[in-house]
Image (cartoon, rainbow, N blue to C red):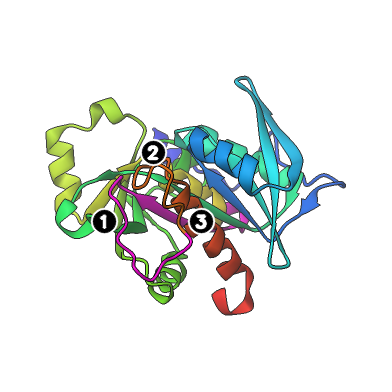
């Protein structure tokens, strides 16, 4: 049974090991959007500092220098196994403990999430990856949700806290399961959060996650968004601006 997969009594056959020449950064920002990757590479990045490899090809890792801080950035792929695996790979190339993960998610409750950033507090484990990093349970706590919420509040960014439903199979999000998850308090559905949080907790890494549902963010106090570039959707570079500011926030002692 997959619920019996967690094994912390014997060593893994393959373990990630930090390389001697790993680049030290204050945090690593991860997107799912190829459009945001293009914009960041052209407008924010200083240079490439590493490469992550898998059968699908090379994933370049960029360096962003801002206000005396150094941040890594790369584009991941959709799904818990590859997103989790690439972070594991990144820990070999980077000396980094903080990971900012953001992207689009389905909205389960538009009445409370419309126009707001969704900050996950717990993730329903309807996937397989998390069961290899944590004992079986229906939910896993997204432990830095209070930090992300405080950042959003202090910067005047509309947000809502709530549970998220992490699934491996978006074509099998049935009506009954939708109703169950919504009744349970889930406000979003995506494919990575449970697996990534389980891995980060297992490895002693800090995950800071937020989702957007494709609605235009109405945040009059937030003035760093890319107002002229695909506003509102998951390819909105303004969401990267939020992630970059969050990376700065958690890299300061007051943000921890």
Residue 57 percent location from the top left of the image: 64, 22
Tag shown at residue 115: 1
Tag shown at residue 241: 3
Was residue 41 drawn as part of the magenta stretch in this picture? no
Which element is circle 1 on? loop
Q: Residue drawn 20% across and 57% down?
A: 185
Residues drawn in magenta: 202-224
* Marks 2 and 3 in Cβ contact (< 8 Å): no
Q: Could you give the CA–CA distance between mark 1 and mark 3, rounded to whole angstroms?
A: 17 Å
Residue 36 against residue 151 in the figure, above or below = above
Quadrant location of residue 53? top right
Q: Residue drawn 79% across and 50% down?
A: 23
The residue that label 2 is drawn on is 191
Q: Is residue 216 found left or right of 134 in the rendered image?
A: left
Category of crowding for the residue at label 3, using alpha-carbon neighbours closer than 10 angstroms: few (below 14), some (14–19), many (at least 20): some
Residue placed furthest toward the top? 55
Residue 41 percent location from the top left of the image: 64, 40
Tally the marks: 3
Q: Residue drawn 17% across and 41% down?
A: 178
Give the mark, 1 or 2, whose residue is nearer the N terminus.
Answer: 1
Residue 26 percent location from the top left of the image: 69, 61
């Amino acid at each position: 049974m997959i619920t019996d997969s967690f094994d912390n009594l014997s060593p893994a056959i393959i373990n990630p090991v930090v390389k001697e020449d790993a680049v030290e950064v204050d945090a690593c920002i991860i997107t799912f959007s190829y459009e945001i990757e293009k914009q960041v590479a052209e407008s924010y990045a200083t240079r490439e500092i590493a490469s992550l490899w898998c059968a699908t090809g090379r994933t370049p890792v960029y360096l962003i220098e801002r206000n005396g801080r150094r941040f890594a950035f790369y584009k991941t792929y959709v799904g818990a196994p590859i997103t989790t695996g690439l972070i594991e790979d990144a820990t070999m190339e980077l000396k980094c403990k903080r990971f900012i993960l953001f992207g689009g998610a389905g909205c389960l409750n538009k009445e409370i999430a419309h126009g707001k950033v969704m900050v996950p507090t717990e993730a329903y484990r309807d996937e397989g990856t998390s069961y290899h990093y944590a004992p079986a349970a229906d939910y896993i706590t997204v432990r830095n949700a209070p930090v992300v919420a405080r950042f959003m509040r202090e910067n005047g960014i509309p947000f809502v806290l709530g549970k998220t439903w992490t699934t491996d199979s978006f074509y099998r999000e049935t009506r009954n399961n939708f109703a169950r998850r919504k009744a349970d308090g889930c406000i979003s559905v995506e494919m990575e959060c449970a697996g990534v949080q389980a891995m980060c907790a297992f490895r002693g890494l800090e995950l800071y996650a937020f989702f957007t549902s494709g609605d235009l963010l109405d945040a009059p106090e937030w003035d760093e968004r890319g107002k002229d570039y695909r506003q509102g959707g998951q390819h909105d570079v303004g969401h990267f601006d939020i992630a970059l500011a969050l990376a700065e926030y958690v890299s300061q002692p007051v943000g921890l």
